[in-house]
Amino acid sequence: MADAQWRREGVQRAMTQQEKTLVLKLDVLAHYCPDGEIQCACCGEDWPIFLGIDHMNGQGAKHREEVGRGAVLHRWLKNNGYPEGYQVLCFTL
């Protein structure tokens, strides 16, 4: 019984972390979108699952090596006061 409870609590913690990660992503995307309306700067795609942060200066690969990607990058952007030089683009082709 204790083992099942431990697993259930672990799943609840994981779900909570996933929710926190999603909220962080949505906050960052909203910040980098005009008027806070989350959408791709080039095509208007608005499903957050298809959206990401683009380094407008072309140094994205280098920056991701230094900082990280995904939630780590989102946290870095927030912790650094949402610096300029980023935009929201979609992953679709």
Image (cartoon, rainbow, N blue to C red):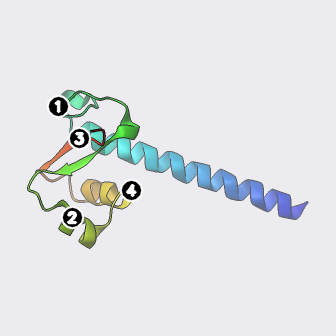
Q: Which mark is residue 89?
A: 3
> Which residue is nearer to you in this view: 70 or 1?
70
Mark 1 and 4 residues: CB-CB less than 8 Å, in contact? no
Give the residue pinned by disc 1.
34
Q: Which mark is residue 71?
A: 4
Residue at 21%, 35% in the rendered image: 33
Considering every residue shown, the one lying at the far right of the view is: 1
Which residue is labeled 2 in the image? 61
What's the distance in space between the residues labelled 4 and 3, CA to CA?
16 Å
Question: Is the Cβ of the residue at disc 1 closer than 8 Å to that at disc 2?
Answer: no
Horizontal relation, residue 49 to residue 51: left or right: right
Tell me which label, 1 or 4, sits earlier in the chain: 1
Instruction: Report crowding for label 1: few under 14, some 14 to 19, many 20 or more residues within 10 A (C-alpha).
Output: few
The three-letter code of the residue at mark 4 reads: Ala
What residue sits 72% from the left and 56% below the top?
9
Q: Is residue 40 left or right of residue 50?
A: left
Instruction: From the top left corner, tell me how far across and down residue 85 is, in percent.
Output: 11, 51
Mark nearer the N terminus (1 vs 2): 1
Nearer to us of marks 4 and 2 is 2
Q: Are marks 4 and 3 in contact (CB under 8 Å)?
A: no
The label nearer to you, 1 versus 3, is 3
Give the CA separation, mark 1 to mark 3.
Answer: 13 Å
Upstream in sequence: badge 3 or badge 2 = 2
Closer to the chain start, of discs 4 and 3, is 4
Is residue 48 shown above or below 56? above
Look at the image and tell me in which quarter the C terminus lies: top left
Residue 46 versus residue 62 in the image, above or below: above
Disc 1 versus disc 2: nearer the observer: 2
**Corner quadrant of residue 74:** bottom left
